[in-house]
Amino acid sequence: MSSRRLLSAAGLAAFIGIWEAVARSGLVPVALLPPPSAIPARFVSEISLGIWQTMVLASLGHYLVGLLIGSLLGVVVGGAVALFPRVDAAQAWVARLLRPIPPLAWIPFAIIWFGISETAAAFIIAIGIFWINYFTAYAAVGAVDKDLIELARAFGHRSLKARLQKVIMPAAAPGILSGLRAGIGQGWMTVVAAELFGITGIGQRMMEAAGLLATPVVIVYMATIAVLYGISDTLFLMVQTRILRWQP
């Protein structure tokens, strides 16, 4: 184990130790800040009751749908806009108008259009992920060296499809993959917000627990999101490394 990992582990242990000490000192009511030692028992209780599995599977369902839709549309639209200057000019003000609107602001429309359903949650998640991938794909494709594209033309790759396959996508891949990775994290941050209006999932369970001051349960699901993000990010990083193995 490297010294960096040892320091990271020590920092985490110190954080948990300070948290435990503060929670047990009486400075803060236990109902507001439960000690870390109280969390495992509540986690086991949530699992034994089947609640944890139900909530996690529900959240994973609309998270994956939102991730797929937001990522696919973001990359395709962002890349297309970068490739065609007229399209870029036509949508520039529309993008500037819509981009600052946070995903939470779309909740009323999500309810009106889709009702209180998993589709509404997936819609909210997709919006948050879309803009990250849109701008990273736009920047990555737009930054491809124009001399490389002209060189591809000179070697007979005159169709857009050929240039995409041989030059544009390989050159833009690192930037696009970085955006996809950022979208994975953004999606998990949006999951809780997307479930606040009564959709079954981690966010709904956290709100129920908070209303009952069951703060250990809230922390169980906060930790669950952190672990799920860590797993998804690690898996994507493995895929990214494999795709970009051609890089020096």
Image (cartoon, rainbow, N blue to C red):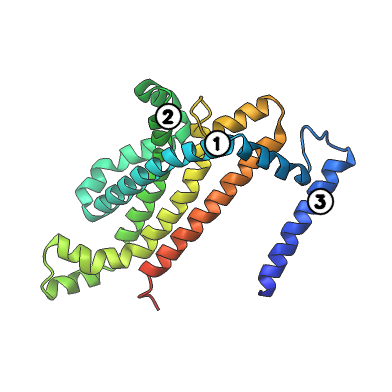
Quadrant in which the N terminus is drawn: bottom right
- Mark 3 or mark 2: which comes first in sequence? 3
Quadrant in which the C terminus is drawn: bottom left
Alpha carbons under labels 3 and 1: distance apart: 27 Å
Residue located at (33% from left, 54% from top): 138
Q: Nearer the viewer, mark 2 or mark 1?
A: 1
Residue 6, position as x, y percentages in the image? 71, 69
Query: Element type at marker 1?
Result: helix
In the rendered image, which residue does mark 3 sit on? 18
In the image, what residue type sits under mark 3?
Ile
In the rendered image, which residue does mark 2 sit on? 106
Q: Residues within 10 Å of mark 2 (few under 14, many from 20)?
A: some
In the image, what residue type sits under mark 2?
Trp
Q: Is residue 209 above or below residue 82?
A: above
- Mark 2 or mark 1: which comes first in sequence? 2
Q: Residues within 10 Å of mark 3 (few under 14, many from 20)?
A: few
Q: Which mark is residue 118?
A: none
In the rendered image, which residue does mark 1 sit on? 202
